Amino acid sequence: MAYEEIDFDIVVVGCGVAGTSAALAAAEAAKEQNKFLNIVVLERTSYENRGGNSRDTAAYLRMEDETKVADNFVEEMLEFSGGRSDEAYIRTLSEKAGETIAWVKDKGVEFDYLPTLFLTSNRPRLLPVGGGRAIIDQLAKRAEQLDVQIAYHSSAWRLGVGEDGTIDEIWIRDDEGIATKVKTKAIILASGGFQGNPEMMTRYVGKDAYKIPTIADGGLSDKGEGLQMTLDIGGKSAGQLDTIHAEPSDPRSNRGDAAIMTYPYGVLVDSAGNRFVDEGISTIDEQYEAVARRIFDLPDHIAYVITDQKLFNIPNYENALQTEKQPIEADSIAELAEKINIPKEQLVKTIEEYNAAVQPGGFDPTQLDGKKTKGLSPEKSNWAIPIDEAPYVCYPIHCSNVFTYGGVATDTQGRVLSNDDHPIPGLYAAGELTGLYHGKYPGGTSVLRGLVYGRIAGTEAVNYVSSKGKVKV
Ligand SMILES: Cc1cc2nc3c(=O)[nH]c(=O)nc-3n(C[C@H](O)[C@H](O)[C@H](O)COP(=O)(O)OP(=O)(O)OC[C@H]3O[C@@H](n4cnc5c(N)ncnc54)[C@H](O)[C@@H]3O)c2cc1C
């Protein structure tokens, strides 16, 4: 035999919020049923690097408080997707959010309303103290206390299906490329999106998409095997495969999540010196994704935020500048243009026209203030104040990939669906790997759904294994 073969009752793939939630929920459900089940989490990376996107996120949760989701949660998620997201999935997410946060809290994670990088916001956002890393560490620790094993340096790449169509094995490779076949009764895929796979980025998102850097290094661990393995056995995809959740960030930064969210208080120009978006169209949390995508659509994928010294009077402005790099400053717009290598006549003209179009009214950086421009194309709808207090301040800004939208289709029990919409017996999925979003991302929902559906999938996988592999449809 060229490969080793080992047995587990339940295999979880991925050690992010979804995988740790699934593993712990499975271990707890087994204990409650007085069953000893061998549960393993397969993780591509090391202990230090585990957790993909989860380890880099502050993990805002779209919740009013610890017990309930924000107002209009279901309606907005459906509206943002143009009615394409699965309503039943979202309703279950909404219903189970409060009890899931209580469960996570019970494992030792604190939640609070900490400062965010959004100076204006449409929805409240609760945060775990210590971010996604704290969630992973606590849930993984509790799972290990219940005898769950975590196998590092183990990348899953192929699913095995028995003659009756039930899932019965998964293949992994270690860092030397040596394969192992794991025999199992149920698998929970929680391996994140495909932002770390240039081939899949090109295949699904399109031309040049492989050039979009991940917002943080953790996303590079998510290489799309979960989706590929599922499609290979006749599983169904869901979510908008050809787009990503995007964020504007500083291309010069070496830091994870070097977001730049100050552009609503100035103007955004392309490398020809022209404005191209309404920088004040809505609260920042509701528009940064669309703006980041527009920046990627520019021929050279880069833009510049131009503001002046008034930026530094805005309360908490530094929260909206997550980069460690200093701004580029100059005493005149022409000099600034030279420093950033864009045509100075055009940039001067753009700023002069913008300043002349600013309408009277009170400026309030903390909410939509209706202070707008008149006569520009595009107009600016809020926070239009003149750029006239030198030194002028500029940050370069590009589009980063937070995560991919498309993934596998699951039902409200976390079961992976076939192309005929039947659950594939023994196969579950949760988190970013599951396709949900279309159009516009409803902020603060990705970690939440990872936790909620990870927990559901873990519990359901135990019920399935306990019922000896018979799947109830
Ligand atoms: C900087 C940043 C900020 C964010 N902010 C927010 C926010 O405020 N609110 C929010 O809700 N969401 C936010 N997100 C998104 C959110 O963090 C992720 O969508 C979520 O954490 C994904 O969790 P997951 O468990 O599904 O996947 P991940 O956390 O990516 O975990 C996947 C795990 O699977 C492992 N893996 C991958 N492939 C394999 C394989 N083949 N075999 C074995 N292991 C594998 C990876 O190494 C990783 O450990 C943010 C993301 C980033 C990067």
Image (cartoon, helix red, strand yellow):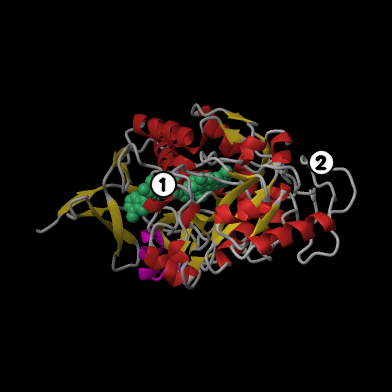
Which is closer to the viewer, label 2 or label 1? Answer: 2
**Is the CB of mark 1 within 8 Å of ligand 1?**
yes
Q: Which residue is mark 2?
A: 364
Horizontal side of residue 2 vs 45, given as left or right: left
Q: Is residue 420 above or below residue 152?
A: below
The quarter of the picture where residue 246 lies is bottom right
- Between 403 and 191, the one lying in front of the other is 403
Count neighbours of disc 1 (C-alpha within 10 A) and say few if under 14, some if 14 to 19, many if 20 or more.
many
Disc 1 on helix, strand or loop?
Answer: helix
Residue 123 is covered by the magenta coloring: no
Residue appearing at x 84%, y 64% in the figure:
375
The quarter of the picture where residue 97 lies is top right
How far apart, in angstroms, are the residues tagged by discs 2 and 1? 36 Å
Region in magenta: 224-236
Q: Which residue is mark 1?
A: 218
Residue with the most extreme right position: 360
Q: Position of residue 200 (x, y in %)?
A: 41, 66
